[in-house]
């Protein structure tokens, strides 16, 4: 990221204190091992942008879903490549997406679900400390959106001490 770039990549909630929203955010932070609410708000903003684009495409096609899908083919292909949409989902499915659909595609979550770590927080630590590779390339950004084709390439770096299956920090029952 360029220095001097002060553009925020997320929107904060409109109202600073809403007990119910704060509880929901806290639950998501814990479930996905996020560092702070900014990461959650970034995912929510990404989802908002997806929905906005889908509404724009449907609106321009005047409700004709086939025409909207044809116009937004690259947009839908990108969402399918990232695993946010399945191959048979249409553009109207974008409007029904939840923030968890975005959070599930983070490297941190995918590494945890694959069993590389015993908690999402541990997965985050392994990634930040450079123990995890995606297709043999070290990635130190837990927020990286993982493409479907990259999923099988997520593993421990062979030079990492964690590559040893007997390492005490390895989660039980890993490959």
Image (cartoon, rainbow, N blue to C red):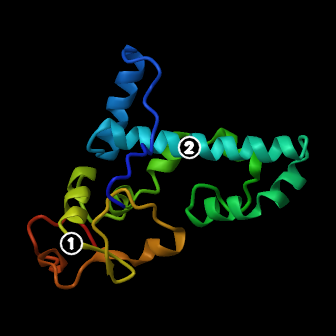
Are there few (<14), some (14-19), or many (20+) residues within 10 Å of tag 2? many
Report whether residue 88 is seen: yes
Q: First in sequence, mark 2 or 1: give its number.
A: 2
Q: How many tags in the picture?
A: 2
Tell me if residue 67 comes above or below residue 51 in the rendering. Answer: below
Residue tagged 1? 131
Are there few (<14), some (14-19), or many (20+) residues within 10 Å of tag 1? many
- As helix, strand or loop, the secondary structure at mark 1 comes to loop
Residue pictured at 52% horizontal, 75% vertical: 149
Comparing 125 with 51, the one in front is: 51
Residue farthest front in this picture: 4
Tell me if residue 65 comes above or below residue 81 in the rendering. Answer: above
Q: Horizontally, is 14 left or right of 136 in the view?
A: right
Residue pictured at 32% horizontal, 57% vertical: 3
Residue pictured at 16% horizontal, 79% vertical: 160
Residue tagged 2? 47
Residue pictured at 40% horizontal, 15% vertical: 18
Whole-angstrom CA distance, mark 2 to mark 1, is: 29 Å
């Amino acid at each position: 990221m360029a220095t001097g770039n002060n553009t925020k990549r997320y929107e904060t909630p409109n109202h600073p204190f809403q007990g119910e929203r704060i509880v929901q955010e806290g639950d998501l932070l814990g479930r996905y091992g996020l560092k702070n609410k900014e990461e959650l708000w970034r995912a929510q903003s990404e989802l908002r942008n997806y929905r906005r684009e889908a509404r724009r495409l449907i609106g321009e096609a005047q409700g004709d879903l086939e025409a909207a899908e044809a116009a937004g083919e690259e947009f839908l292909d990108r969402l399918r490549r990232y695993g946010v949409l399945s191959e048979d989902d249409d553009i109207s499915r974008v409007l029904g997406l939840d923030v968890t659909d975005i959070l599930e595609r983070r490297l941190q979550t995918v590494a945890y679900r694959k069993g590389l770590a015993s908690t999402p927080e541990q997965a985050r630590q392994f990634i930040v400390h450079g123990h995890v590779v995606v297709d043999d390339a070290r990635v130190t950004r837990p927020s990286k959106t993982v493409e479907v084709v990259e999923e099988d390439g997520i593993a421990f770096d062979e030079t990492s001490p964690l590559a040893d299956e007997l390492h005490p920090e390895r989660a039980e029952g890993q490959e």
